[in-house]
Amino acid sequence: MKISCLKVGGRTIKTVVAVFLCLMTGIIRKSDTAFYAAIAAMLCIQRTAEDSLREAFNREVATVIGWIGGMLVLLIEECLVYSI
C-alpha cells in the first residue's frame, strides 16, 4: 500500500497568503468584515495573475452596480415615505 503525499500548488499558496493577509488586516483594523474579504480573496485567486485581476475587476464592477441599485431603492423608498 503506497501512501502519496499531497502536492501543494502555487494557486493554493497564493490563496492561503491572500486569506491570511485579509484576516490579519481585519484583526489589526478591528474590522467585522474581514471574513467577507477573505471569501472575496478566495474567489478572485485564479490560475494566472491576469485572470485574477480580471476576476477582481469583475467583482468590483458588480459591487458598484449593486451599490447603485441599492441607493436607487433607498431613494425611491425615501421619496415614497415622505410623499404621503
Image (cartoon, grey):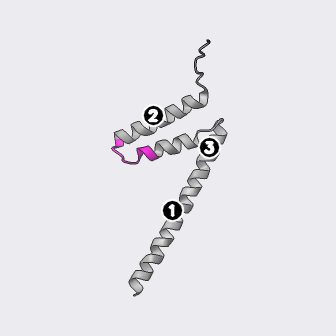
User: Viewed as shown, does residue 29 lie left or right of 66?
Assistant: left
Identify which amino acid the numbered label 2 is placed on. Answer: Phe
Is residue 53 depicted above or below 63 in this figure?
Answer: above
Q: Is residue 30 above or below residue 16?
A: below
**Type of amino acid at the residue the image marks with label 3:** Leu
- Residue 16 in percent (x, y) is at 51, 32
Question: Residue 52, position in %: x, y?
Answer: 62, 41
- Whichever of labels 1 and 2 marks the residue nearer the N terminus, that label is 2
Q: Which residue is mark 1?
A: 67
Q: Earlier in the sequence, mark 2 or mark 3?
A: 2
**In the image: residue 77, left or right of residue 11:** left
Disc 1: CA contacts within 10 A as few (<14), some (14-19) or many (>=20): few
**Disc 1 residue type (three-letter):** Trp
Instruction: Point out which mark residue 53 bears.
Output: 3
- Left or right side of 13 for 34: left
Which label sits on residue 20? 2
- Which of the 4 image quarters holds residue 51? top right
Query: What is the span of residues highlighted in magenta in the rendered image?
Result: 29-36
